[in-house]
Amino acid sequence: MTDVVLVDDDDLYREALSADLADRGFAVSCFADAPSFLEAMSNGIAAQVALLDWVLPQMSGFELLGVLRERGIGLPVVFLTGYSFVERELRALDRGAVDFVDKARGTEVLARRLRVIIEAQRVLPGAGTMPEVARHGDLALHPATARALWRQLDVHLTITEYKIVALLVSRKGEPQTYRAIYDAAHYAGFVAGSGERGHHTNVRSLVKRIRRKFQAIDSGFSEIGNVADVGYLWRDRRS
């Protein structure tokens, strides 16, 4: 099975990106337009994720996503774009895309996103089935890509930071200990820092960085609260 299908009409970019992804261990099949890709799908090509340029000849990437979904093809789709338009991103996500990546962010960021998507499929019970977006007020969590949106804007969390936010939100209103938070970010029993409480400093640093990322979007962000000598919680605004 091909890991990635890349559909982009820029010959130089398509060649460079496919080579960069191949260097990072991905098997890539390339197409210059939507019709040739759809023909390959009809002939049985299989992949774990599709990378679509938003602007394509004959049929846009957004229109191509619609055709895939109309045909019952649940292939995870990631959009590549050189334009950071929030409206486009929201349209793509609402239509069923799992991610939306600015080309300017580089291949390494894209490769990490792809690995998360592919790994998510391996642990899910149904092939081609992606976990649903979890919404908590102004927060939207995209498990398939370890992506968090606050007020419809990407917070740009790392995978580790996403794990922490997901843990806090899943136990909304309940304090999570420093140890539990660090275990979620790494694994149970992970040795961190010096001494029995060495992981406290690491967790504080991680949470401080997470807060800054949310506050860059919303200066009034205060959902993550500290519980003295215990850890942190995600405030339950319903109570």
Image (cartoon, helix red, strand yellow):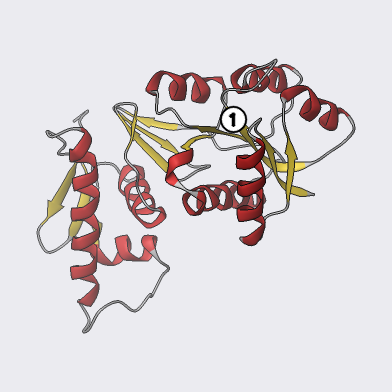
Q: Which quadrant of the rendered structure holds the C terminus?
A: top left
**Image location (x, y in percent) of residue 57:** 67, 19
**Res 236 seen here:** no
Residue at image coords 37%, 49%: 162
Identify whether 139 is placed above or below 21.
above
Tell me: 14 left or right of 138.
right
- Would you say 159 lies left or right of 70 here? left
**Position of residue 195 in the picture relative to residue 54 (left or right):** left
Q: Nearer the viewer, residue 61 or 20?
A: 20
Q: Position of residue 141 (x, y in %)?
A: 41, 37
Residue type (three-letter) at the residue carrying disc 1? Asp
Residue 231 in view = yes
Residue at numbered disc 1: 53
Residue nearest the viewer, comparing 61 with 19: 19
**In the depicted structure, whether residue 203 falls above or below residue 226:** below
* Residue furthest out toward the right: 43
Q: Position of residue 44 (x, y in %)?
A: 87, 36
Q: Residue at x 22, y 83 (%)?
A: 194
Question: Which sits in the foreground, 37 or 3?
Answer: 37
Q: Quadrant of residue 77?
A: top right
Q: Check the image and name the residue furthest to the bottom.
A: 195
Q: Quadrant of residue 192?
A: bottom left
| Identity of the residue drawn at 18% across and 39% down | 215
Tell me the residue at 62%/31% (across/down).
Answer: 52
- Residue 56 position within the rendered picture, expressed as x and y whole percent measured from the top left: 63, 22
Q: Residues within 10 Å of mark 1 (few under 14, many from 20)?
A: many
- Vertical position of residue 93 compared to residue 105: above or below: above
